[in-house]
Amino acid sequence: MAPTAEQASQTQSGSRSGLLFFRGLRQVFSLIFSSRTATVGFFIVAFWVLAALFAPLWTPYSPTYQDWKAPNQGPSAAHPLGTDELGRDLWARLVYGARIVLVVLPVSQQVWLPGGTALWGVAASLVIGAFLGLVSGYKGGWMDEVVMRLLDAMMAVPVILLYLIFVAAMGASAVNVVLAIAIVGTPGIARLVRGLTLDIRTRDYVRAAETRGESPWYVMFVEILPNAKGPIIIDAMLRVGYAIFAMGTLGFLGLGLPPPSPDWGSMVAKGREFILAGSPWAALWPSLSIASLVVGLNLLADGLREETMRYQ
Amino acid sequence: MLVFILRRILLLFLTMLLVSVAVFLITEASPGNVARNVLGSFVTPEQEASFLNQLGLDEPAPVRYVHWLLGSDWRGRHLVGLPLQRLTTKQGFVEWWARRADGNLVRWKLDGDNLVAEVRRPDGSVEEVADNGRWKKRSDGSFYFWGVDTHNRVVLWEKGKQKKAWVFVVGSGWKEVSGGAVDYLPLIKGFLRGDPGVSLRTGRPVAKSLFVRLRNSLVLAGIAFTVVMPLALALGIVAGLREGSVLDRSLSVGGMVFSVIPEFAMGIFLILIFALWLGWLPGATVFGEQAPWQRPDMLVLPVLTLTLIELGYVLRITRASMVEVMRSPYIRTAFIKGLSYRRVVFKHAVRNALIAPITVIMLHVNWLLGGIVVVEVVFGYPGLGKYLLNSALYKDINALEAGAMIMVVVAVGTQLIADILYTFLNPRIRYR
């Protein structure tokens, strides 16, 4: 008897949470569309997400197919955005490049994980940062002191130095890019979560849980963390923009994904060599793509923040 | 206040120590080495081992870190048995010599089985004399000698056991030379004693190249800074005074858009527009022996890139600060008192509105450093960032450590200056 009752309650709660999810989605959309900047940002981001998700539909070419007869060409009917120095179709490389950023994480030649490289980087820093912030904010004492001093030292080190040394030493691969983004992002998130934790732990429901005899871990992850999610989500959205920025910069410096993969930053670095030879297309399009995606995400986050602040 | 500054300086040194250890560990733990990077992937294991031995890279990592930090001459002195001295020749080269008991400076080279001493006279000329009396005998009958060679290394020679050494000369490639030694210990005074060593990639002293690069970067950053600051503060104040107007909206959205575009993309756009399309300015920087300020036309685009990126950031902070100040009660009081608009804005509002941006900008230097590295790569500008990038890619540990230390000093130092500035601008805050 017990299992069925449990199942029933599960399906019920499932459909209820599904309903809540849709209502939440509708709220989010009405929030987005009530701000002009957020709307513009939303459409830019949506364009790239769709381009990345359905990359094979938008182009007949593979991102690594080389047309030896047509290197460094401008836009034409066969190649809508032109070709790079090896005759690879730039539009195909752009949409498959968007895939690496937003949809898949290439761990190795064979293994691919769902979720883009930039998203994994942010997710990893969220997990580590939230854990450190929660523990040091809730427990306090010497642990707080040690963790915060270490994070301060990390924040004092120039970000670019961390990137250069870490990725240059460990070699260029998607996993190392994720690690670099995660390491750089962690201190900021930890500080944010610690601040929120210090505020929330004085609330009555936390007191109630403590009096009930719940373990510290329960209090931290079930009582405090869910109540801190609002600011964390907005921060994470800005951080995705920043992670894409960082990915592009790493790629441009030659520290991104290894060559034939259609990494936007590496495409710019390669295309740059051919600008003064008279074929600017291979550098122009990936620069435009990365700029538009980062600007789109920032417009979206900025608009959302303004709207939510207006209602509070 | 003094205690506060001292504590922060102590913290700066602690951060530098931590970073130097971390840089060393990461470079150490990762695959590949400088020999493979400098010599290319077709190097034979024999050549690689010879190269590593000559650079002293076959020593254990902790020993090498101590050498880098504190110097290796004290260890060399112990091995040679004579005091060692570092001097700079008239041409500007650094040379290490041993001081003989009679006060003359001396170093050695091997000619067949004969040991030849180079004795330096006070006027700088060198006299060569045979010096076979210095061979020491081991219990198994072989002869050995620890001495200073002509390439600033303490070396161990063994009689009859001349090793062939592979010497890599930058520019001309590999040379197989005889007279090679069994073990090498490059002489260095150590970072703490003001000698960051020799670049493993180019063979030039790190300090020499680093300061030229640092100067170039400072020129770039300085010009960008003096262009950005007045412009961004003025625009931010204007936008903040007209909160919600079309001007304000377009300035703040435009500023945001410019400040989040990656520096390399911005640089490419500017090159395409001004160098390729309009043909007004050069799209790359080639200085040769000239200093950056001798070619102002080449500085325009790098400075413009940095300006556009920083402009938006400073503008938005100034605007937010201005808006907040204009809403505060004391500004209302000033208006009600009957002061003119101009007087209220310039005498009362602006001063307080500038506190936040000025300190935040100093904290932003950390970020600006990254921007400068990228801009230097985009335009091929010979600055600190490019030097650091190449050193990191080649695992040139001496150059990498020195560059990293400079970056940490700049980043942490400006944060300290920001904190001190803040107490002057806002007397309500006192650090203990």
Image (cartoon, coloured by chain):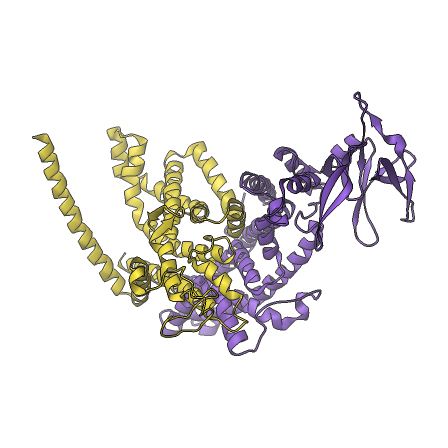
Q: Residue furthest toward the top?
A: B139
Quarter where residue B145 is shown: top right
For the colour yellow, the matching chain is A
Front one among B221 and A168: A168
Residue placed most toward the observer, B303 or B44 = B44
Looking at the image, which residue is at 79% across and 21% down?
B140
Residue B175 at what x, y percent from top left? 73, 48
Question: On the rendered image, what quadrant is the C terminus of chain A found in?
Answer: bottom left
Which residue is the extreme one toward the front? A69
- Taking A26 as reference, is A50 left or right? right
Q: Is A180 on the left-hand or right-hand side of B157?
A: left
Q: Is residue B324 left or right of residue B397?
A: left
Residue B267: x, y in percent?
51, 66
Q: Residue at x 59, y 53 (%)?
A: B390
Q: Report the residue that reaches farthest toward the left.
A: A1
Work out which quarter of the rendered image holds the N terminus of chain A and state it: top left
Q: How many marks?
A: 0
Q: In the image shown, does A39 or A171 lie closer to the viewer?
A: A171
Q: Is residue B192 above or below residue A29?
A: above
Q: Position of residue B181 (x, y in %)?
A: 76, 36
Foreground residue, B4 or B126? B126
Q: Is residue A11 visible?
A: yes
Vertical side of B385 occupied by A193: above or below? above
Which hue belongs to chain B?
A: purple
